Amino acid sequence: LATVLVFCIVIYFQGFRVDIPLKSQRQRGMQATYPIKLFYTSNIPIILQTALVSNVYFMSQVLYKKFSNNVLVRMLGRWAIVEGGGGSMQPVGGLAYYISPPTSLTEVVADPLHAIIYFVFIISACGFFSKFWIEVSGSSPRDVTRQLRDQGMIMGGYRTDSMVSVFNRYIPTAAAFGGMAIGALTIIADFMGAIGSGTGILLAVTIIYQYFETFSKETGGRGLGFLGL
């Protein structure tokens, strides 16, 4: 039930977007829109955040096995073997512990500081990576304006040079807030006990939705009749 609920929430938020009206300078009467979605960077923030945490875990475990008495290594993470876990280890202290998700509500009550730091870390990291991604992926306001200019598309009532200011109002906000929303949904999925991890569910839902949108565009909506859409 928790998995289905999280799935529905993500699909609902996928529909949040602002459509910027455009018109062509080359073909009279041709109009289009540029959609700026709430999840502007899709699942990229959670992918980058997961990669960051995985690298921290890896380095911390390797160092702790060799230099378990070193103060700096113990600050990075202290590890203990899980009973009945086949030799697997879990963080029990240090940075690695505080960026790992609480395993149960009982653990949250027993160590609320861990839960708070984890929540703040996930939200902040996803928001940061989302803003970072638009700058390096060619989807920042300047890049979008340049791409539309090259295609001969402009906004009605705006000069070409002033289009970037309009995108500056929407794209950075959508990227940051969307990234934080992805992080919050991941935490909610983890605490609700959804099947698998919250990260896995978010990745699965966003990928499925992207394929759904692509299929809808290619068929012009005609192929969705069997879904009643």
Image: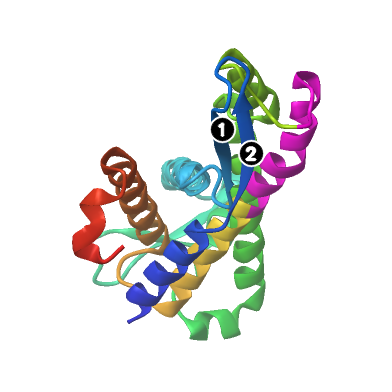
Taking the view exactly as shown, the residue that stands out farthest to the left is: 226
- Majority secondary structure of the magenta segment? helix
Q: Residue 144, percent across and down?
A: 62, 26
The reply, left or right, for residue 26 in relation to residue 156 is left
Q: Split into 4 quadrants, where in the image is the C terminus? A: bottom left
Could you say which disc has been placed on residue 31 in the image? 1
Say which of marks 1 and 2 sits in front. Answer: 1
Q: Residue at x 57, y 37 (%)?
A: 34
Front residue of 59/162: it is 162
Q: Quadrant of residue 31?
A: top right
Front residue of 32/94: it is 32
Q: Write down the residue under mark 2.
A: 21
Q: Residue at x 58, y 19 (%)?
A: 147
Magenta span: 157-177
* Label 1 crowd (10 A; few <14 / some 14-19 / many >=20): some
16 shown above or below 55: below
Front residue of 84/5: it is 5
13 shown above or below 129: below
Q: Is residue 131 visible?
A: yes
Callout 1–callout 2 Cβ contact below 8 Å: yes
Q: Residue at x 52, y 62 (%)?
A: 13
- Determine if the magenta segment contains residue 172: yes
What distance separates the C-alpha of mark 1 from that of mark 2? 7 Å
Q: Residue at x 46, y 40 (%)?
A: 55
68 shown above or below 192: above
125 shown above or below 118: above
